[in-house]
Amino acid sequence: MTTLLLVEDDRTIGQALESSLELHGYDVHWARAGGAALGEAQRTPFDLVLLDLGLPDLDGVEVCRRLRAMQPQTVLVIVTARQDEIDVVVGLEAGADDYLVKPVRLGELLARVRAHLRRGPSTARQSIAVGGLLVDTAGRKASVAGQEVPLRTKEFDLLARLAEGVGTAVSRETLMADVWDAHWYGSTKTLDVHIASLRRKLMAGAPSAEQAPVITTLRGHGYRLELPQE
Ligand code: CA
C-alpha cells in the first residue's frame, strides 16, 4: 500500500485531502504540525509527502529540509498558500520535488500524486560512479575527482539523469519529462539555463579543466554527458 504523509494544520483542508486520498486507496498519515510530521517520519517511511509551508510550530522550509534528510527517497511536494515565488524556490532548494499553490484543486493534486508515484522515488537510484564523477543520489551530492560540487536541486537531478547513460544522448523531451514536472513541460528554456549553470559548476568544481565532465549539446536533439579518460 502506498503510504503518504500529509502535513497540514488547517482542519478543513486537512480533512478534505485526507478523505479524498484515502478514497483513492492511499494510506494517509495526517500530521497537524511540523514537529508531529518529523515524529511521523521517524517511525514510517513514506512514498510521498504533501507539506504545507505555513505551520504553527516550525518553519515549513526547515521541516522540508529535515524531512528530505530523514527520507532521501520520498517524493516531497510542497503545498503552499504563499504566492511569493521566493518561498517556492527556497522550498525546492530545501529538497522538495514539486509544489502546488493553494487553493489546490483535488483533481490536480491527485493527478500530480499519481504521476510522481508512477515515476517512482526521484532519488532512489543508487550512486553512479564513473570516470572520477560520483553522483550520490541518496545523499544528493555530486563530486568530481573527490571534490564536492554544490548543486541546486534541478541541476543535481539533471546531472543524475545524464549520468545514468554516460556517452549516451538524452533527448530534451526525456530530460524535461524526467527532471521537470508536468506544469513546466511547455517551456524548455529552463533546461538550457540549468545545463549552462551545471556546466559552469562542474568546470569550477573540478580540480582541473581536464578532469571536468563535459555536457555536449546535440543540436535539435538533446545532450550527452562525457567524462574525461582516466
Ligand atoms: Ca497552514
Image (spheres, grey):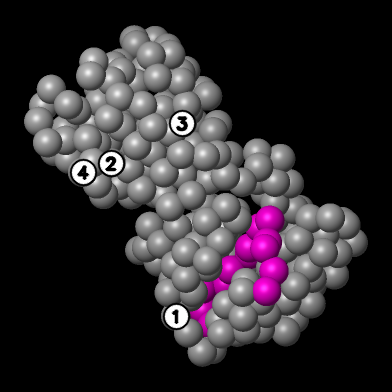
Q: Of discs 3 and 4, which sits in the foreground? A: 4
Q: Are marks 3 and 1 in contact (CB under 8 Å)?
A: no
| Three-letter residue code for mark 1 | Asp
Determine the image quadrant of residue 227: top left
In the rendered image, is residue 64 in sight?
Answer: no
The CA distance from mark 2 to mark 3 is 15 Å
Q: Between disc 3 and disc 4, whose residue precedes?
A: 4
Q: Between disc 1 and disc 2, whose residue precedes?
A: 1
Point out the residue furthest to the front here.
Answer: 230
| Three-letter residue code for mark 3 | Arg
The CA distance from mark 3 to mark 4 is 20 Å
Q: Secondary structure at mark 4?
A: strand
| Three-letter residue code for mark 2 | Ser
Q: Of discs 2 and 3, which sits in the foreground? A: 2
Determine the image quadrant of residue 3: bottom right
Position of residue 122 measured from the top left corner of the image (x, y, whole percent): 56, 44
Q: Secondary structure at mark 2?
A: strand
Numbered badge on residue 161: 3
Q: Secondary structure at mark 1?
A: loop
Q: Which residues are magenta?
A: 43-55
**Disc 3 C-beta below 8 A from ligand 1:** no
Determine the image quadrant of residue 77: bottom right
Instruction: Tell me which residue sits at (75%, 53%) in the image.
Output: 110
Q: Would you say residue 54 sits in the magenta stretch?
A: yes
